[in-house]
Amino acid sequence: MGSAKWYLLNLHITCILLDWAMTVLAVPYLIFPALGGYPLGVLRFWFGVPSIVQLYVVMNLAFFAVTSVTLIFENRFYQLYARNSFWRYLRIPFIIINYLLDATHLLPACLMVPDQKTALEFTYEQIPNLSDEIKAEPLFILAIDFWVQMPYISMGLRNVVQVCLFGLINRNMNLESRSFNRSENTINLQRKFLNAIKAQLMVLAINFLVPQAYTVVSIATNYYNQFANNLVITIVALHGINSTLIMLWAHKTYREYCFKTFKKIRSFLGYTTPVSTVSIQPKASITI
């Protein structure tokens, strides 16, 4: 747990920032299959932040969240099986390249934003049943070309890397469970960790792969369903709470530390758990 605490903290902070961006700061309202929409958060109404800046920040936070989960898998694989392998020389460049790609994926699209008047005309033709309420909003169209989906494809490839790391850990644990090199208690602990990885992988698949798959299908087939678009945003926004619950359930040390901190906060605020007292009345004795 000690070697993974900074990776868990990184994941937790990234999830918090992504949640705030999706539900408070930006609150994107997307209109797939068009690559556009408009924000509904405080950054627009209170601070007047341009839509393109909000889009860039939210997308980068989503990329960072995927990378933070990948790094947890990589750290566990390295600590358990690859400390003496050639991977120890490649892991730092691997981490740096991932974050560089996260920060630069969307730059070409943001630097080549089409003329919004032309883009809106294209969008209205692409989605003829777009409601007048949405048309009245300040719609921002990122692009009218298919190549802008490359960041989504990159996220999918990164998820494949996670599956490969998970497969390597699973294979090695199965091999070790058949040998007598380690105690049964150690193997059981590793199996518990494997279950935690399965849960984290499931959360990632639900909160990122499912929305990503729908987005690609919607754009490829030119399918418009505003309810489904809103559901995509809701599913992505739930990643933070789902990931936090998984960490509290899967990592005992992390869970105990959080509960200990929560008790300290309650004590600092003056909240104490009431102790119920039960009074026992003495029974009258009858002597003959």
Image (tube, helix red, strand yellow):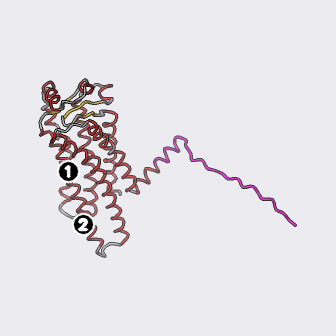
**Label 1 crowd bin: few (<14), some (14–19), many (20+), radius 10 Å:** some
Q: Amino acid at mark 1?
A: Arg
The quadrant in which the C terminus is found is: bottom right
From the image, which quarter does the N terminus lie in?
Answer: bottom left
Amino acid type of disc 2? Answer: Arg
- Mark linked to residue 90: none
Q: On the image, which quarter does residue 24 sit in?
A: top left
- Residue beneath the point at 23% across and 25% down: 135
264 or 14, which lies in front?
14
Q: Residue furthest front?
A: 129
Instruction: Report the span colored magenta.
Output: 261-288
* Coordinates of residue 173 in the picture (x, y in percent): 28, 67
Q: Position of residue 185 (x, y in %)?
A: 38, 69
Instruction: Point out residue 34 in the picture as x, y percentages from the top left corner.
Output: 18, 34
As drawn, the residue found furthest toward the right would be 288
Q: Is residue 273 magenta?
A: yes
Q: State the residue position of label 1.
A: 158
State the image coordinates of residue 134 (x, y, percent, origin top left).
25, 27
Disc 2 residue crowd, few under 14, some 14–19, many 20+, Cα 10 Å: few
The answer to whether residue 47 is above or below residue 207 is: above
Q: 184 or 24, which lies in front?
A: 24
Look at the picture and state if 31 lies above or below 288.
above
The residue shown at (17%, 46%) is 153
Q: Main secondary structure of the magenta part?
A: loop
- SS of the residue at dot 2? helix
Q: Toward which corner of the image does residue 114 lie, by quadrant?
A: top left
For residue 260, side relative to residue 217 (left or right): right
Q: Which residue is mark 2?
A: 171
Asked if residue 243 lies left or right of residue 271, the reply is left
Estimate the spatial distance between the alpha carbons at disc 1 and disc 2, rounded to whole Å: 20 Å
